[in-house]
Image (cartoon, rainbow, N blue to C red):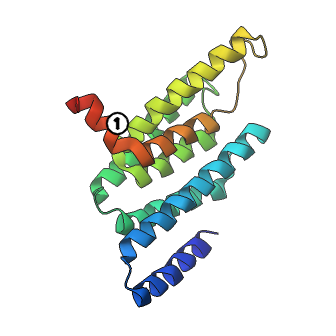
């Protein structure tokens, strides 16, 4: 699957070069489309089964590798830090409070961290936690779930990742710089 995305991207780049288009822009557009497709697939599967397949997390990580070239504004060191800055704390929380997060959620945030860099990963996590918290509160209020019951958290994290991917810089500038 990941190799298919990469080969499709290379074909489009070849076509765009022949037409005189900016190949980096075309690659970034294809990358964003692939990420959205992966995030939607993760959300639908997790909502239905409460599991995130490993191959989807690997596909998202593959998009992160492509992003090293397509989105060079995020430094490689930021991506490596992003790989661990959210996933390790989630793993530690999961070790202390059993089943606080699923393993797929932890791996999802590791892959997202490499895609977005550490700042984007933190933003995606905050947005995902906010969305997930609102959803959990709503489930409790309508009495569909009790306070100790689990619900699929992947869709909320995917919304946070997508928001950080498309609006991360704008949101961080607004929050930290007030502009």
Which of the pair 95/21 is nearer the observer? 21
Where is 39 relative to 143, above or below? below
Q: Residue at x 60, y 50 (%)?
A: 39
Where is 122 relative to 53, above or below? above
Q: Residue at x 58, y 74 (%)?
A: 3
Q: Position of residue 138 (x, y in %)?
A: 67, 16
> Regarding mark 1 in the picture, which secondary structure is present there?
helix
Residue 47 seen in the figure? yes
Q: Residue at x 34, y 36 (%)?
A: 171
Residue marked by disc 1: 171
**Residue 152 quadrant:** top right
Which of the pair 7/92 is nearer the observer? 7
Q: Position of residue 13 (x, y in %)?
A: 45, 81
Quadrant location of the C terminus? top left
Q: Which residue is situated farthest in the front direction here? A: 19
Residue 51 seen in the figure? no
Left or right: 16 with respect to 156?
left
Q: Position of residue 122 (x, y in %)?
A: 39, 36
Quadrant location of the N terminus? bottom right
């Amino acid at each position: 699957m990941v190799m298919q995305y990469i080969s499709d991207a290379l074909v489009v780049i070849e076509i765009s070069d022949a037409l005189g288009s900016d190949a980096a822009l075309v690659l970034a557009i294809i990358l964003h489309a692939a990420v959205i497709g992966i995030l939607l697939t993760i959300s639908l599967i997790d909502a239905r089964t409460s599991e995130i397949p490993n191959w989807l997390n690997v596909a998202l990580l593959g998009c992160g590798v492509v992003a090293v070239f397509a989105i060079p504004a995020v430094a490689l060191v930021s991506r490596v830090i992003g790989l661990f800055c959210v996933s390790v704390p989630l793993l530690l929380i999961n070790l202390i409070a059993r089943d606080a997060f699923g393993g797929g959620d932890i791996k999802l945030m590791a892959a997202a961290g490499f895609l977005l860099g550490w700042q984007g990963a933190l933003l995606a996590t905050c947005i995902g936690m906010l969305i997930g918290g609102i959803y959990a509160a709503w489930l409790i209020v309508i009495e569909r779930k009790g306070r100790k019951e689990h619900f699929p958290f992947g869709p909320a994290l995917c919304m946070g990742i997508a928001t950080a991917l498309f609006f991360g810089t704008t949101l961080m500038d607004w929050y930290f710089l007030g502009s």
